[in-house]
Every structure is written in C-alpha cells, then in structure tokens.
Amino acid sequence: MRTVAEGLWPWVIGPALVLPDTPLGWALPLLYFLLIFLGQGAIVYLAIRMPALEPSDLGESSKRSLVSVIIPARNEREDLARCLDDLRGQDWIRSGGALEILVVDGGSSDGTADMARSHPSQPTVIDEPPLPPGWVGKNWACHQGAQRARGDLLLFLDADVRLAPGAVRAAVAQQASTGADLLTLAARVVMEGFWERVVMPLYVQFVLLYFVAPRVNNDRSSRAMANGQFMFFSRAGYQRSGGHEGVRGAVLEDVRLAQEVKRRGGRLRIFWAPELISTRMYSDRAEMDEGILKNLHGTRFSLGRQVGLSLAIFVYFLSPFVVVALALLGLVSFLWFVFGLALIGVTALKQVAFQGAIRAPRAYGLLYPIGCAYYLGLFARSVRLGLKGGKVQWKGREYNMDA
C-alpha cells in the first residue's frame, strides 16, 4: 500500500520543488524563506527588547541596607581572588552601604579557602558540610551561606564573575525601584580562543529565544529565568520562593528558582548589564563541553525536547545550505537556490551584528555553521546519555537524572 506522501509526490510535491512556474512551486520556497527569515528576526527582536540596567541614585533607606554576598566556591582560587577584589572596591561601601561577604568552600584542594581567609576583604569563610543525598553541590553551598547571612538583601554570586565598582549599588537601586523579589543580571560573556568565540554567541541567542527573555519582566507572563552568576534576592522573596532548599536537586537551579518566584506570586526582573558585570564562563574547551552539556540536559531528560531543539537548530541555521546544495544538483528549482542563498546571507549578517552587540569579535559570526554543528553533537551526546541512564557531571561531581 502506498503512503499519502508517495501518492502526492509525482503530482504535487515533486513539481512544487522542481518547477517554479506553478502556484505551489512559488508558494513552498516562499513559505520556507519566510519561516527561516522570521525565526532569525525573532532573535534580533528579542535582543532589541532586552532591557538594560540603568544605574540610579540611592535613597537614604537603601544606603542603610546590609547586602549579604554569598559565593559558592570549589577550586576557584584565582577567580575568587579577583571577585573579592572587585567586591572590596564597590562604591556601595564608599557611599555608606554595608556589605557582608560569605564564601562557602566546597572542599577545594587548591587553597581556595586559605586564600579567602587571608584576603583584605575579610570574608566569612564557611567550610561546606558533607553533601547530603539529593542535593546539588552549588545549591547546598548557597543554602549554607543563606543560613548564615544577616542581610535583608542576598546576592548569590559566582566566583568567576567580575564586577564594576557600581554593580552592587546599581542592583540595590534597581531592586528598590522595581520591588523585585529576585533581580538577576545578564553578564557580558568574555570569550577567549576559537571555540568560545564560535559557540558562546549562539548560546546567548538560544537562551534569549528559548526563554523569551524580555517576557520575564512581565508580571502577567509565566516566562521565568535567572542567571545564577548574579541573583539578587530580597530576603522575604528568597524565603517565599523556598530558597535553594526548595530546588536542592536541580542542576539548573537559577531557572527553577525564578520559576518558583513567579509561581508564588513574586516579582522577577532581568536586565542586560554589560558595563557592570562580566564573566568568562569556561576556562577551556573541556570545561565548556561539560558545562553546556549540563545546561542543555539538566537532570530531567526529555527525548522529545532534545530532538525538537536539534531539529530547530538544523532547520533555522543549517537547512539553507542543504537547499542550495540540492539546487546545484538540480533536485530543486532555481527559486529554492535564490531563497536558500539569501537566507545564508541574512543569517550571516545577523550573526556578525549579534557578535558585535555582545562585545565578541564580529568575524567569528561567519563561522556559525561550525557552532551549530557543535551543538548538534552535544544534543546527540545528551540523547545517548539520557537513553543509557547516565549521570550529569559538573565540577568533579555526578548527579543522577530523572526520566
């Protein structure tokens, strides 16, 4: 028995692909062009709509606030030293604000805790108790810090983050003016080396699109995300969300916390703050592979999600190359060739412009097909890992996955 597609192919689909002088022969390539063009345009639209943090003057009540900075650290001696230097230089302190720094050491073997104890910023160093079953290491460390913190404002900060002198002051002001239970800042990603410059700009785009990031600031929208590198809570908002204890087993704890804030009626705000906060997320290719795989996968494996996202990357970024190749082989009409070539040009221009917007070398935007192939490889690894019932690895620890 022939399938419907086999029956339609010689009479409808085949001519539509090969012959441009039929209604369907024009409609199909045009629809394809619009689909990809609008998909690429959606990324540009969301990037433009992403709000930037505007530092504002502090009121007297804000100046009297105590900000407790909680930094989970595991074998991050050099990064942590620079982060503590930045905290010591905050103009929030010079303007009369109070800053409490708590470093939670997760069993480091590189002298991280000793360095912190001798640092001029004089942080309180907490030796992380043994990791209980069911907890992710970072969540356990943040929970320990929150238990010891005295401030009404809690800033959870990654050790590899670099802060401009006005970062804390701007965050306090923005939290006060918006009444946010959770204020999170998107950092400028510092990229060094070939693979970071090819891969990380795509990562930023995927995050923008997957979470529809600007919608996060709409209190009526269920969209929620946060950047775990910089999460600024009011204490009341943190406790109301359930804190890190409520998301103890989540590898993507920042997203889960943001979801909990909104689910419980709290206010969530996210801002792009390249002048105030920056970070080099991964120190080398191996760490980047492990970190991005962890973020793509999480601990809740979904075959449908992974396959769907892989297809989306292929269709929106790589399929124009396939269309052009088929046209050159004479398997589809010249109109497909024109639209495919146009889409390659549009996507390349968008990539170059986006790279510049996030302060990355523009020329690497032309290499986006390599970056997309990299992600397809990671998704394939994720599927293989999920089907085998493997574990998510990060910073020397392993976590079981839930189907």
Image (cartoon, rainbow, N blue to C red):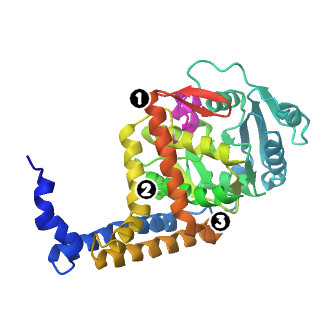
- Is residue 267 something one can see in this rendering? no
Question: Which sits earlier in the primary sequence, circle 1 or circle 3?
Answer: 3
Classify 245 as above or below 24. above
The CA span between labels 3 and 2 is 21 Å
Task: Find disc 3 in the rendering and name its residue.
Answer: 360
Q: Is residue 261 above or below residue 26?
A: above
As shown in the figure, which amino acid type bears the numbered disc 3?
A: Ala
Mark closer to the chain start, 3 or 2: 2
- Does the magenta segment cover residue 253? yes
C-alpha distance separating marks 1 and 3: 37 Å
Q: Residue at x 10, y 57 (%)?
A: 7
SS for dot 3: loop
> What residue did someone put label 1 on?
403
Q: Nearer the viewer, mark 3 or mark 2?
A: 2
Q: Which residue is at the front of the view, 28 or 65? A: 28
Closer to the camera in the image, 315 or 235:
315
The numbered mark, 2 or 1, whose residue comes first in the sequence reads 2
Mark 2 and mark 1: span between their CA atoms? 23 Å
Q: Is residue 2 magenta?
A: no
**Segment colored magenta:** 237-255
- When the figure is inspected, residue 249 is found, relative to residue 329, above or below; the finding is above
Q: SS of the residue at dot 2? A: helix
Label placed on residue 313: 2
Element type at mark 1: loop
- Left or right: residue 14 versus residue 176 is left
